C-alpha cells in the first residue's frame, strides 16, 4: 500500500470503509431484536419483556453462526490473495453444507429451550418461530463470509441491510393480526428472502463450486470453525444465562435489562466493524509492514472510538426511557444500568479490535482462551444477580470481562509471546 503519508491515508481509508460495511452487516440481528422490542411495547410491558428475552436468545444463537462468517473471511481472503479461484469455490461449497447443518442444530436447540417451560409468557412461541429462521441465517453468514474474503464486503452489507428493512416492513404489517407471533413470522420471512438472494448472487458470481473441498483445506477450515464455535458458544451461553438472571429479578427489571442490552449490542456491532476490518485486511495482506500499520491504527483508533460511542450511549438514555420503554417503571429501571453499560461499550471497543487482528492472523486458539477467561466474569455477574436482584451487576461483569481480555493481551505482547 506504500509508505509515508499517502500510504497511511490509503490504509486509513480502506479500514474506515471496511469497518462501516462490516458494522452494517453485523447489525442485522441486534436491530431486528430492537425493532421487535419496540413493536411489542405497543401491546403491554409483559409482551415487551417476553419479546426482549426471546430476541436476546436469538441474538445469542445468531452469534453461534459467527464462525461461518469469520472462518470463511480468513480462509477465502488468503486464497483470493493467492489467486486460487477454484479452491475458493470448493471452500464456499463446503461452508454451505456446514452452514445448513449448524443452522438445523441451532434451530433444534432453540426449539428445545422454547418448549422447556423456562421462558415466561409469550417469549416461548416468539422464540420458537424465530428459531426456524436459523438455517437461513447460517446459510447467509457462510455466503457473506465468502463475499468478504473476495473483497465484496459491500455486497454482504447490502444484503444484511435489505433483510433488516424487510423485517421492519413485515413486522409492521404482521403484528396487527398476529401480535408477537407476527413479529416472529417477519423474522423468518426476512431471513428466507436474504438466504435466497445471497445464494443466487453467489452462484451468479461463480463462488460456489461443484467439487468437494480438498482435505488440507477442510482441515484448516475445520480447525478454525471448531475454535470459533467454542468461542461463540461460550459467549452465547453466557448471554442466555445473563438474560435468565435478569428475568429472575422481575418483569420490570427484566424488560429494562433487555432494552439496555438491545441498544448496547447495536452500539457494539459498530465497534465490531473494526474487528471485521482488521480481520479482512490482515487475511488479505501479505506485507508485514502494512500489517503493522493496520494493527497500530486499529488499536489506537478503537480506544478513541470507544470513548465517543460510550458518550453517545450515555446521551441516548432519555430517548430510551421516553420512546423505547413500554412503561414508566421500565424507564426508571433503566437509569442504574446505563452507566455500567456505557463502560462496557468502551472496553468492548478495544477488546473487539484486538480480536479482529488475531482472527486475521489466524490466531484463533490464543483468542479463544482469552475470551473464555473474560466470559467467566459475565457468568459471575449473572450468578450474583440471581441472589441479589441487582441487575446492574450484569453490566459490571461484562465490562470487567472485556477489561481482563485487554490486560491479558497486553501482558502477552509485553512478554513477546504473541498478542497484537
Image: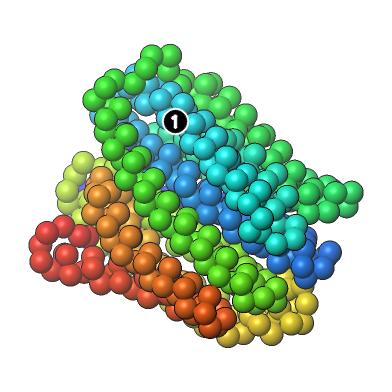
Q: Nearer the viewer, residue 320 or 158?
A: 320
Considering every residue shown, the one lying at the far left of the view is 416
Q: Find disc 1 in the rendering and name its residue.
A: 98
Query: Can residue 20 be seen in the rendering of this structure?
Result: no
Query: Can residue 274 be seen in the rendering of this structure?
Result: yes
Q: Percent from the top left, x then y, of residue 280?
A: 35, 45
* Above or below for 251 versus 188: below
Q: Nearer the viewer, residue 271 or 286?
A: 271
Left or right: residue 1 versus residue 326 is: left
Left or right: residue 23 versus residue 162 is: left
Q: Percent from the top left, x then y, of residue 374?
A: 34, 66
Considering every residue shown, the one lying at the far right of the view is 177
Considering every residue shown, the one lying at the far front of the view is 117
The residue that appears at 34% across and 54% down in the rendered structure is: 356
The residue that appears at 45% across and 21% down in the rendered structure is: 208
* Above or below for 238 versus 281: below
Q: Nearer the viewer, residue 86 or 412?
A: 412
Report crowding for label 1: few under 14, some 14 to 19, many 20 or more residues within 10 A (C-alpha). some
* Above or below for 115 versus 354: above
Q: Percent from the top left, x then y, of residue 267?
A: 53, 65
Left or right: residue 162 versus residue 105 is: right
Location of the C terminus by quadrant is: bottom left
Amino acid at each position: 500500500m506504500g509508505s509515508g503519508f499517502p500510504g497511511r491515508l490509503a490504509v486509513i481509508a480502506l479500514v474506515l470503509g471496511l469497518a462501516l460495511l462490516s458494522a452494517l452487516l453485523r447489525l442485522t440481528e441486534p436491530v431486528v431484536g430492537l425493532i421487535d422490542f419496540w413493536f411489542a411495547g405497543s401491546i403491554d410491558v409483559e409482551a415487551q419483556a417476553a419479546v426482549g428475552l426471546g430476541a436476546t436468545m436469538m441474538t445469542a444463537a445468531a452469534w453461534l453462526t459467527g464462525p461461518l462468517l469469520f472462518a470463511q473471511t480468513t480462509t477465502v481472503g488468503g486464497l483470493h490473495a493467492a489467486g486460487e479461484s477454484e479452491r475458493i469455490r470448493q471452500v464456499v461449497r463446503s461452508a454451505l453444507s456446514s452452514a445448513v447443518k449448524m443452522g438445523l442444530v441451532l434451530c433444534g436447540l432453540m426449539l428445545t429451550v422454547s418448549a422447556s417451560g423456562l421462558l415466561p409468557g409469550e417469549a416461548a412461541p416468539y422464540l420458537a418461530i424465530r428459531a426456524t429462521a436459523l438455517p437461513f441465517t447460517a446459510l447467509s453468514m457462510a455466503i457473506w463470509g465468502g463475499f468478504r474474503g473476495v473483497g465484496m464486503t459491500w455486497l454482504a452489507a447490502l444484503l444484511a441491510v435489505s433483510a433488516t428493512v424487510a423485517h421492519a416492513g413485515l413486522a409492521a404489517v404482521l403484528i396487527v393480526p398476529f401480535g408477537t407471533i407476527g413479529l416472529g413470522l417477519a423474522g423468518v420471512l426476512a431471513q428466507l428472502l436474504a438466504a435466497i438472494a445471497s445464494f443466487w448472487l453467489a452462484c451468479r458470481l461463480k463462488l460456489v463450486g461443484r467439487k468437494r473441498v480438498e482435505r488440507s483445506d477442510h482441515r484448516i477450515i475445520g480447525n478454525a470453525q471448531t475454535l470459533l464455535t467454542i468461542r461463540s458458544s461460550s459467549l452465547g451461553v453466557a448471554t442466555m444465562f445473563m438474560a435468565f438472571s435478569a428475568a429472575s429479578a422481575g418483569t420490570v427489571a427484566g424488560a429494562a435489562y433487555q432494552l439496555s442490552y438491545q441498544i448496547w449490542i447495536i452500539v457494539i456491532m459498530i465497534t465490531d466493524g473494526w474487528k471485521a476490518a482488521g480481520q479482512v485486511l490482515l487475511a488479505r495482506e501479505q506485507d508485514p509492514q502494512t500489517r503493522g500499520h493496520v494493527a497500530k491504527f486499529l488499536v489506537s483508533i478503537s480506544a478513541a472510538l470507544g470513548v465517543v460511542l460510550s458518550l453517545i450511549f450515555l446521551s441516548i438514555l432519555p430517548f430510551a426511557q421516553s420512546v423505547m420503554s413500554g412503561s414508566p417503571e421500565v424507564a426508571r429501571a433503566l437509569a442504574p444500568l446505563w452507566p455500567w453499560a456505557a463502560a462496557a461499550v468502551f472496553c468492548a471497543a478495544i477488546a473487539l479490535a484486538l480480536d479482529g487482528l488475531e482472527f486475521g492472523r489466524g490466531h484463533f486458539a490464543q483468542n479463544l482462551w482469552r475470551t473464555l477467561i473474560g466470559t467467566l466474569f459475565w457468568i459471575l455477574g449473572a450468578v450474583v444477580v440471581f441472589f441479589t436482584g441487582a441487575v446492574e451487576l450484569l453490566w459490571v461483569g461484562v465490562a470487567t470481562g472485556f477489561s481482563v481480555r485487554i490486560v491479558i493481551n497486553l501482558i502477552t505482547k509485553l512478554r513477546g509471546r504473541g498478542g497484537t
